[in-house]
Amino acid sequence: MPIEKIEYRDLLNELISLIENAKQQVISQANSALTVLFWSVGKRILNHNLQNKRGEYGKQIVVTLSRELVEKFGNNYEEKNLRRMIQFADKYSDFENVVTLSRHLSWSHFLALIPLKDQNTRDFYGNLAYNNLFGVRDLREKIKQKVFERTENANLQLLESKNIEKGIFKDPYFLDFLGLKDGYLENDLESAILKELELFILELGNGFTFVERQKRMIIDGDDYNLDLLFYHRKLKRLVAIELKIDKFKAKYKGQMELYLKWLDKYEKQDGEQPPIGLILCAVASKEQIELLEMHKDGIIVAEYWTELPAKEILEAKLHETLIEARERIARKQLRE
């Protein structure tokens, strides 16, 4: 191909890229402006109703305003949408926070966040979507998977930890995508994870990179094998994962401590933080874990579930788990 045609093609491709990027910025700015507008509309109506302090008046004025606004500006201002805008302004009272989030989150994102029960939950999922550039479908999936509740449960194990950053791990982990049947062995679990490695990494969370399976360590002439070794980019440290198909036992702590010390001595690179460990068990022995204070040694224990119950049962089970964890912490604080 002649040089002139190559140069022309390069020029054309560059111009196409510039135009497409600019169009995307215009769309993003328009979405952001629309979201801020909807918040402002909701805030103005909310303030008006609060000033008048009349319930029936407030209900009626939304209907009347909607009728007028739809006629002038279209269906975006139907009654149900106006009520969503009011809820939006009520749930997100900080205007600057709305402006910041709207740079990456659309009105549809906020429609998924508004129904959530408390501010901590909304903030968690809003920041998760913002930091990871999640689409609306991804955000709804994270909410459905109860990522906040599971992360909070893991964080409770790390309240006094100086070695493990909060917000990285979950408890439990959902491994229903592995398709395991009753009677599986540890090798079956490991093989299934490796077969569905991409899904497993998605369940682990953002930042994890797979390094090696069955990491071999020779200590005093004996062979030891770590099930899975990952690296976390944000933490800048290796993450050792051991898989156990039974209930947690105290001896698992000593095994993981040995692996972490070996990794720290022989595998840690300059500039990295000390390795940390995750023990995945079919059942976590909560009292043993509390007594062993494993977080002080850079180890966290979490359950994994290969089958998920119905939504209502799942919510109840996670809620019960969180209550039990908080009660254990409260009892410990009373003893100290």
Image: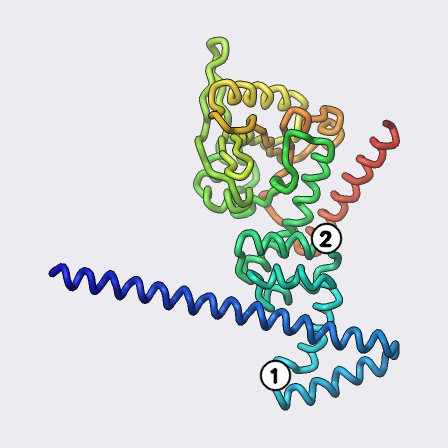
Q: Residue at x 63, y 33 (%)?
A: 164
The residues tagged by marks 2 and 1 sit, at their Cα atoms, a distance apart of 32 Å
The residue under label 2 is which amino acid type?
Answer: Asn
Question: Is the C terminus in the top left, top right, bottom left or bottom right quadrant?
Answer: top right
Q: Is residue 181 above or below residue 162?
A: below
* Residue found farthest to the top: 220
Tell me residue 28's x, y (percent): 51, 66
Say which quarter of the image contains residue 254: top right
Residue 75 marker? 1
Q: Residue at x 20, y 61 (%)?
A: 7
Tell me residue 242's x, y (percent): 55, 29
Judge from the rendering whether residue 206 lies leftward or rightward of residue 87; answer left or right.
left
Judge from the rendering whether residue 178 lies leftward or rightward of residue 155; answer left or right.
left
Q: Residue at x 37, y 68 (%)?
A: 19
Q: Mark 2 or mark 1, which has the lower sequence index?
A: 1
Q: Residue at x 84, y 32 (%)?
A: 333
Q: Is residue 65 above or below residue 217?
A: below
* Location of mark 2 (residue): 120
Describe the element under mark 1 as helix, strand or loop. Answer: helix
Of residues 252 and 170, the one nearer the viewer is 170
Of residues 228 and 248, the one nearer the viewer is 228
Residue 125 marker? none
Q: Are marks 2 and 1 in contact (CB under 8 Å)?
A: no
Describe the element under mark 2 as helix, strand or loop. Answer: helix
Q: Is residue 190 above or below residue 67?
A: above
Q: Is residue 259 above or below residue 86?
A: above
Tell me residue 235's x, y (percent): 55, 36
The residue under label 1 is which amino acid type?
Answer: Asn
Of residues 54 and 192, the one nearer the viewer is 54
* Residue found farthest to the left: 2
